Amino acid sequence: MGIKVVKFGGSSVADAIQLQKVKNIVLADPDRKFVIVSAPGKRFSEDSKITDLLYLCKTHIDHNVSPEHVFQVICDRFRSMEMNLGVNIGIEKDLEEIRSNLKSGITADYIASRGEYLCGKLAAAVLGFDFVDPAGLIQFDERGRHLPEETHKALCAELAKHECAVIPGFYGSNPDGTIRTFSRGGSDVTGSLVAKAVNADMYENWTDVSGFLMADPRIVDSPKPIKNITYKELRELSYMGASVLHEDAVFPVREVNIPINIRNTNEPENPGTIISDTPSESDNAITGIAGRKDFVVIALYKNMMNSEIGFVKRLLTILENNEIAFEHLPSGIDTVCLVISKKQLEGKLTDLIDDIEKRLKPDSVEIYQDMALIATVGLGMSRRIGVSATLFTALSKAQVNVRMIDQGSSEMNIIVGVENDHFETAIKAIYDAFVS
């Protein structure tokens, strides 16, 4: 096929057993030439992620508490992995260097990155691949902003020297050489940047789920898998809470049309989900359903609002002045609704309403607390007659009161606002109506 870049998440590299699975997966396909690894994750539900333990070490130091007890847990974990894998990466030297740097007051980004660094060295030894440290390759500016062009140039130059390599995820470096990390989950981004740099034919992202499902399995019993999804559909579902992939990981590969394959390390025979710009040929009218709770809807009514020039502009200026971001802005001739995350309004709601009433003088302002948003997403919706009717009939039969409706101009999604208490009932009703 060509070159495949494969990224393994924390659960996929949690211990020696999981790393052996990684070895079997990678070596089963000679096209899998570049491997990105996260730090070891949880081995069982009560376990701790290595990255969390590393952050805890830093917290101990900041509060003048010895981190040695926590750091010993980290050391024992990596020593066990090295021994059980039957490799020798000089782990003691690396651990002693990290311990020394801890005592010298190293940054939180440095200490957090060491989980990926050590796991990368272990994976490289197990696979017999070269180890490539992303420090100096994945570049950030003085303010911590990622530099995509500089990163791409550096990665292209370095990776061209290696036929097969393991690259730790999650981190790069500042101009002065100090370590800088992405946000949590940033190993997905590293994998995407590497895939673009080597002009990969496929970016495989291996985790502990077999791709995307049409609905949350905690709400819908055994929802169907999504075999193919477009980047646009993924963006809509991820925004509404269906998260398997770090959202920033999409853009580097999408720019050069590299598909992403979400796979399950524990079920390697499962084909997972393909993410690309090619629409699915599925007969389903919808691709998936996702949602989030805890929104506030502020509904403004003002007679002849449509003829008042600049009304919405002034409303958005009020939000900006109060440092509040909104999610949706459905409107009518004399009405406009602000849909805002409850977190955005903590300690600000009273002042916001006062500003709105003072500056815009609406005839009425109504506030709906504890609202949930549910997005029904699918490119096929625009080609189907009766999608909206099916959706709202299902909600009516389930006795779900719809407080808000918003449909994008692309007709790719329909978003409804319901009370938090009706959230699960609404998702089940929508799923049952479209998926037989």
Image (spheres, rainbow, N blue to C red):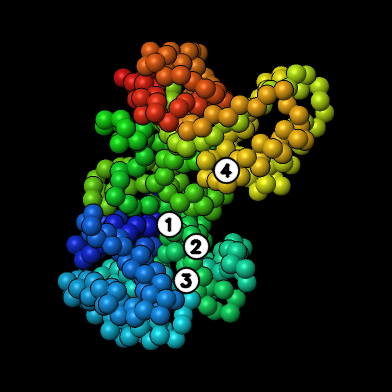
Name which residue type carries label 3.
Asp
Front-most of 147 and 198?
147
> How much space separates mark 3 and mark 4, taking CA atoms?
30 Å
Name which residue type carries label 2.
Phe
Visible residue check, residue 157 = no
Q: Which is closer to the viewer, label 4 or label 1?
A: 4
Q: Residues within 10 Å of mark 1 (few under 14, many from 20)?
A: some
Residue occupied by mark 2? 182
Q: Where is residue 72 drawn, in percent x and y?
A: 26, 77
Q: Which is closer to the viewer, label 1 or label 3?
A: 3
Residue at horizontal 58 percent and vertical 67 percent from the top: 144
Front-most of 304 and 82?
304
Q: Residues within 10 Å of mark 4 (few under 14, many from 20)?
A: some
Residue occupied by mark 1? 185
Q: Which is closer to the viewer, label 3 or label 2?
A: 3
Name which residue type carries label 4.
Leu
Front-most of 22 and 207?
207
Q: Which is closer to the viewer, label 3 or label 4?
A: 4
* Rendering quarter of residue 177: bottom right
Residue occupied by mark 4? 345
Q: Where is residue 382 drawn, in percent x and y?
A: 54, 21
> How much space separates mark 4 and mark 1, taking CA atoms?
27 Å
